[in-house]
Amino acid sequence: MLTGSIKKVCCIGAGYVGGPSMAVFADNCKNIQFTVVDINKDRISAWNDDDFKKLPIFEPGLDQIIARTRGKNLFFSTEIKKSISEADMIFLSVNTPIKISGLGAGKASDLKFIEASARLVAEEARGFTIVVEKSTLPVKTAETIKSILFSSQTIKNDIQIDRKFSVLSNPEFLAEGTAINDLENPDRVLIGGDDDDSIEALSSIYENWIQKDKIIKTNLWSSELSKLAANAFLAQRISSINSMSAFCEVTGANINEVSNAIGTDSRIGSKFLSSGPGFGGSCFKKDILNLVYLCSFYGLDEVSNYWEQVILLNDWQQKRISHLIIQNLFGTLAEKKIGILGFSFKANTNDTRQSPAIKICKDLLEEGAELSIYDPKVSMETINLELTNTSISQDESKFSNEKITVCESIDEVAVNADAIVLITDWPLFKNINWDTISKLMRKPSWVFDTRNCIDDVQCLKANINVWKLGVGILR
Ligand code: UDX
Ligand code: ADP
């Protein structure tokens, strides 16, 4: 295949990865047509909505790019077969959640969506098609995709079908909330494969806006493993700083000062050293669990145990925050109202997958608390589903909506609240007027700041008790 010969691209999966990625591709490659397809009709309708506030995902800057490209060289469609059959290149961007039953349950990735997409591609593709893994996948998934594609029938109803495939791995490193910048100015682009022409074809697309020396080319397995390893290293940093946050609280050290002091060592670096309520999001936990599962499968028990500890520390961090809240509120939350600020797993996204807010809220509900929750971008429906519906949260849920009020403002959260717990570091939470909030709360009032981002001096002046992660109770 000649470089520059890609004219039509299909992306299967219109989610947090597929949507923003194809939008940025389309914005930078005007002579290629990108079609993002999905089995979820509502999601596709939302991507096609004229009201950009109704796009299915919130990502700063995304609406402007969609406005520039949609209907020109970017399309969202449910015509999956048609789009596959016309495409020269197909990205697989479907979800790969953790398996909830069967072999590897709770650890291995569920590849049923990837497999279904690969089977459809095997059936519908025509001519030479480059299939690119975009979703985070366990190492060696390309093997599965290859075996499905390469065993596709080339003779159907006595008619010879011209069909050939090449498989590449091109993992996505975007972080939600900064996805557009991450896609426009990535630290690197990674392309793994064993067919040089296909690698060049994909590389030439990226070269429309990314410097050639930022494009790293490896074999398939190195590319797949590099994605898991990068996420594992990032998550490990968070568990490391979170372990220090607990240590700071008992020794009188301050986690911000410690982060700053160690981050100035150029060998360590200052990024990803903010302690918080534990990492959330769809990738970190899933990828490490995958690593743990695969290492143990290959008999590398010490390696497996090492990485599992990153997850255990993360779970512990969330548990210890809810315990601290309960302890400071005299050991019981019955008849108490707790305000929750932030429900998404991080600021600037409406994604709630694996959000620390879910576990913390469930612990507080378990203790009998009534919750009033405010998040600037997460819908009431999603919050209620995450806390009460088993199909989303994937564990047994026994909580009813009666104990949960989803609010429209910070003030509404504060009315008669005994405590406010700040879980997501949305910028607007940094400028709260604690004088006003204090007047709305029940006394004694508490604020538990799990992100170290409130104005604690003003909070204390307003006669509110303050607990800060990595510092403890302020006096
Ligand atoms: C991550 C990777 O960063 C990205 O490269 C990969 O493609 C997908 O997974 P994402 O999960 O979207 O991206 O967001 P990220 O910014 O990595 O944050 C993950 C979690 O870690 C969030 O819950 C965040 O609040 C938490 N975090 C991050 C911290 O607690 N402290 C930090 O210093 C950084
Ligand atoms: P990610 O964060 O990896 O993008 P999402 O869950 O946001 O994950 O998006 C994945 C999308 O893939 C969903 O919208 C889902 O409906 C879609 N999807 C899953 N399986 C298929 C399939 N076989 N064909 C088309 N779309 C699919």
Image (cartoon, rainbow, N blue to C red):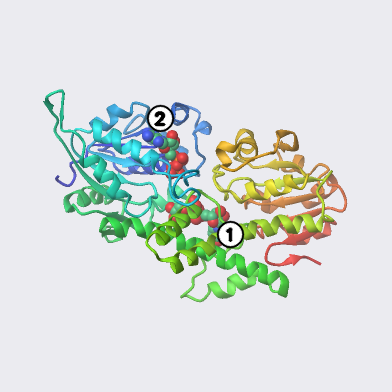
Determine the residue positioned at 35% across, 29% down.
71
Distance of mark 2 from mark 1, alpha carbons?
A: 34 Å
Q: Which of marks 2 and 1 is nearer the N terminus?
A: 2
Q: What element carries label 1?
A: helix
Q: In which quarter of the image is the C terminus?
A: bottom right
Q: Which of 349 and 157 is in front in this view?
A: 157
Residue at the extreme top of the image, as rendered: 157
Q: How many neighbours does mark 2 have within 10 angstroms: few (below 14), some (14-19), or many (20 or more)?
A: some
Is disc 2's CB within 8 Å of ligand 2? yes
Residue 414 x/y as whole percent: 78, 44
Residue 108 in view: yes
The amino acid marked with disc number 1 is Asn
Q: What element carries label 2?
A: loop
Residue 4: quarter of image: top left
In the picture, measured across the screen, residue 155 lies left or right of residue 213, that is: left
Residue 52 x/y as whole percent: 50, 32
In the picture, measured across the screen, residue 461 lies left or right of residue 39, that is: right
Residue 16 in view: no
Residue at the spot of label 1 = 314
Residue 201 x/y as whole percent: 21, 48
Q: Quadrant of the N terminus?
A: top left
The amino acid marked with disc number 2 is Ile
Q: Nearer the viewer, residue 39 or 410?
A: 39
In the picture, measured across the screen, residue 94 lies left or right of residue 211, that is: right
Q: Nearer the viewer, residue 91 or 97?
A: 97
Identify the mark at residue 39; answer none if there is no mark.
2
